[in-house]
Amino acid sequence: MRRKFRSKKAEARFRRHLSVRKAISGTKARPRLCVFRSLRELYGSLIDDETGHTLFSESTLSLRKNGALKGGGNKDAAKAAGVSLAKKAIENGIESVVFDRAGYKYHGRVRAFSEGAREAGLRF
C-alpha cells in the first residue's frame, strides 16, 4: 500500500529518513537519538531499536510547560532541549548515542539540538 503525503516535500523527507534508517540502528548501550521537528516545537527521543522501546524523550513543549522556556520554535529552545535530554541520559548511564536527523538538513534547530546534547556530555 502506498502512503499518502500532503506535499512532495513531506514525501521527500520521508524517503530521506528511510535512507538514513537503513544505515543506523540503536542498541541499549548506544541508543538512537531521533529528532522530530514541527513548526512550533522540537522533540528528541533516545530509542533502543533492538527491543523497540523509547528510553527517554524531551521536547521544547515539555520544557515550556515546566516553565523553563518561553517559546519552543527557535534555536535557543532546541539547544535547551538537547542539554536537558543529555543530562537525563547521563544520569541513567548513557554516554554515547547514534544521531538520527530523520531526513532533516543538519542546520538550524536540528543542529542546535545536537550541539546542546554534545555540550552537556553526550558523544556521537
Image (cartoon, rainbow, N blue to C red):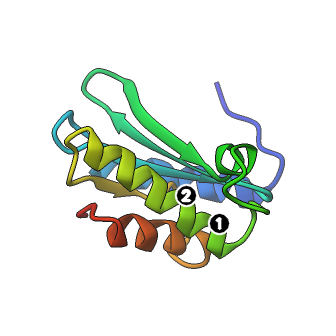
Considering depth in this image, is 36 or 5 the residue closer to the camera? 36
Please name whichever residue, 36 or 43, is drawn nearer the observer in this view of the structure. Answer: 43
Is residue 107 placed above or below 1 in the rendered structure?
Answer: below
Q: Along the horizontal axis of the image, is 63 left or right of 6?
A: left
Q: How many labels does the image show?
A: 2
Q: Do the residues labelled 2 and 1 touch (CB within 8 Å)?
A: yes
Residue behind mark 1: 77
Of all residues shown, which one is farthest toward the bottom?
107
Q: Can residue 75 be seen in this view?
A: yes
Mark 2 vs mark 1, CA separation in Å: 6 Å
Residue 73: percent from the left, percent from the top? 75, 64
Label ID, residue 27: none
Pointer 2 local density, CA inside 10 Å: few below 14, some 14–19, many at least 20: many
Amino acid under label 1?
Ala
**Is the N terminus in the top left, top right, bottom left or bottom right quadrant?**
top right
The residue lying at 45 percent from left, 49 percent from top is 34
Q: Which residue is tagged 2?
A: 81
Label 2 sits on a secondary structure element that is: helix
Q: Which residue is pictured at 71% across the width and 71% down the height?
A: 74
**Please, what is the three-letter code of the amino acid marked with disc 2?**
Ala
Q: Which of 119 and 114 is in front in this view?
A: 119
